[in-house]
Image (cartoon, helix red, strand yellow):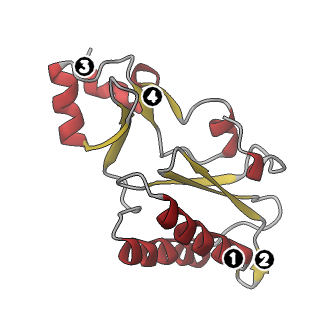
Amino acid sequence: MKLPALDGFPGDARVWVFGAERELDHAETGIFLEAVDDFISGWAAHGAPLRAGRAWCYGRFLIIGADVSATSPSGCSIDALVHVLGEMEHRLGVRFLGNEAVWYRDGRDCIRKASRTEFRSLANTGAVTPASVVFDNSITELAELRNGRWEGPARERWHAAFFGG
């Protein structure tokens, strides 16, 4: 995946992927990304500025990257990022945080979110298959994103466990 905002970052840059529970409209996207950009421009770890960037994908996914070779994000700096996203959840009425969701493309190529229990049911009924495209928001390095590990067939991701044998 090509992410111009993160092009100059090394492959070992730390990434976080957050999915919006629904697609944001134009106005919401503007509000959200302005807040994220404001945060990133002043993001620091123990007073040292972080070299960071972000990408907005498919109107639903925020990808934050930080160059760990410059300054590594600290626990407090990561907490600050989560705090900003929590504020945006409240302001926009859209959930961004939480890792219990499974993201996938349905048969019409629309991006959907399901709980793990719901996704298992979809797998059991054949509504999703090992070939269904899923998003692995648990990736942690930019190289994984560049190498196609974020979006791809369920059979090639941790999601394969939902299909048994």
| Residue position for label 2 | 49
Residue 62 vs 93, above or below: the answer is above
Viewer-proximal residue among 148 and 59? 59
Question: Which residue ends up furthest to the front in the rendered image?
Answer: 26
Kind of residue at disc 4: Arg
For the residues bearing labels 2 and 1, Cβ distance under 8 angstroms: yes
**Which mark sits nearer the N-terminus, 3 or 4?**
4
Q: Secondary structure at mark 1?
A: loop
List x then y, in percent, for residue 78.
57, 71
Q: Secondary structure at mark 2?
A: strand
**Which mark sits nearer the N-terminus, 1 or 4?**
1
Which mark's residue is nearer the viewer, 2 or 3?
Answer: 2
For the residues bearing labels 1 and 3, Cβ distance under 8 angstroms: no
Query: Gap in Å between the C-alphas at discs 2 and 1?
Result: 6 Å
Query: Gap in Å between the C-alphas at discs 2 and 4?
Result: 34 Å
For the residues bearing labels 2 and 3, Cβ distance under 8 angstroms: no
For the residues bearing labels 1 and 4, Cβ distance under 8 angstroms: no
Query: Gap in Å between the C-alphas at discs 1 and 3?
Result: 43 Å
Viewer-proximal residue among 117 and 110? 110
- Tell me the residue at 73%/47% (across/down): 12
Query: Gap in Å between the C-alphas at discs 1 and 4?
Result: 32 Å
List x then y, in percent, for residue 153.
45, 22
Horizontally, residue 5 falls left or right of residue 39, namely: right
How many other residues sit within 10 Å of disc 1, few (<14), some (14-19) or many (≥20)? many
| Residue position for label 3 | 164
Kind of residue at disc 2: Pro
List x then y, in percent, for residue 39.
64, 76
How many other residues sit within 10 Å of disc 3, few (<14), some (14-19) or many (≥20)? few
- Tell me the residue at 78%/76% (across/down): 49
| Residue position for label 1 | 43
| Residue position for label 4 | 157
